[in-house]
């Protein structure tokens, strides 16, 4: 399992997802609500959107997030209207390497996966494409990106992959965050997901701070964050 988070709204520094006594750095070694696994030390990554680039910027490492001495300075100045970050607990049997670490990217999209799913449940969903890595998360990303390339709206591409994968692997945990810079879609399927609205939308595996206003997303639901707010719908 993993922990991940996203922001959509007025520009914020990446540090707002990572730091603090409940941010992703703390969740990497002391998650409060994680249902499987106790430590997320198999890598970390972050992605954000810069005005001068058509594609998102990505930074990821295959080391525990607390060991990267360069990250605090980077996170303080990397600011964007749309941010995605994750800390990883590798699925058993999957390599600990940067290519297996979220967020995965393709064109304008960023994708993070919190959970696990059998490769056999995903093989038919790849539509002939080769994943970046052998990890289940990379296979999920490839399946979603293939549908986005085909023109499916973000929420429909995410919902289709999650429901088809779950039908083939009923024990799968399929919490996804997928962003395109202007929208963020996230699913609750087998693990916790929370949302908070305040000058924008925060979505996270578990609350990133202790403010009131965090709401649990029901299991088997999808959250779509837009500049106008958040809509939650059943999968």
Image (cartoon, grey):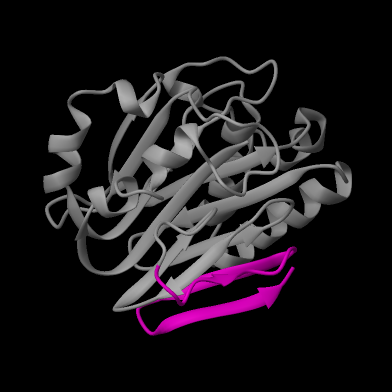
Q: Is residue 34 visible?
A: yes
Q: Nearer the viewer, residue 30 or 130?
A: 30
Q: Quadrant of residue 210?
A: bottom left
Query: Residue at left 67%, top 61%?
Result: 159
Query: Residue at left 37%, top 35%?
Result: 45
Locate the N terminus by quadrant. top right
Above or below, comparing residue 109 to residue 36 in the picture: below
Q: Quadrant of residue 163?
A: bottom right
Query: Residue at left 14%, top 46%?
Result: 76
Q: Is residue 102 visible?
A: no
Query: Residue at left 42%, top 48%?
Result: 110
Locate the C terminus by quadrant. bottom right
Residue 21 x, y percent position in the rendering: 36, 48
Above or below, comparing residue 154 to residue 200 in the picture: above
Residue 160 x, y percent position in the rendering: 71, 59
- Whether residue 168 sits left or right of residue 162 in the image: it is right
Residue 233 x, y percent position in the rendering: 67, 77
- Whether residue 178 sits left or right of residue 63 in the image: it is right
User: Magenta stretch?
Assistant: 211-235
- Whether residue 43 sits left or right of residue 135 in the image: it is left
């Amino acid at each position: 399992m993993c922990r991940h988070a996203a922001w959509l709204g007025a520009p914020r520094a990446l540090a707002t997802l990572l730091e603090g006594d409940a941010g992703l750095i703390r969740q990497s070694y002391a998650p409060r609500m994680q249902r499987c696994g106790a430590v997320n030390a198999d890598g970390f990554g972050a992605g954000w959107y810069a005005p001068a680039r058509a594609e998102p910027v990505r930074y990821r490492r295959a080391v525990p997030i607390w060991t990267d001495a360069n990250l605090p300075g980077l996170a303080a100045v990397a600011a964007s209207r749309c941010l995605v970050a994750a800390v990883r607990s590798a699925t058993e049997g999957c390599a600990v390497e940067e290519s297996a670490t979220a967020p995965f990217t393709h064109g304008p999209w960023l994708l993070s996966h919190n959970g696990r799913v059998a490769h056999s449940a995903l093989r038919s969903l790849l539509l002939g494409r080769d994943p970046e890595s052998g990890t289940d998360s990379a296979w999920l990303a490839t399946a979603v990106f293939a549908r986005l390339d085909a023109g499916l709206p973000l929420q429909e591409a995410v919902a289709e992959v999650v429901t088809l994968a779950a039908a083939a692997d009923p024990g799968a945990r399929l919490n996804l965050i997928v962003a395109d810079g202007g929208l963020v879609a996230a699913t609750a399927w087998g693990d916790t997901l929370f949302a908070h609205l305040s000058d924008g939308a925060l979505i996270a595996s578990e609350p990133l701070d202790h403010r009131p206003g965090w709401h649990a997303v029901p299991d088997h639901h999808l959250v779509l964050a837009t500049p106008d707010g958040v809509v939650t719908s059943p999968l």
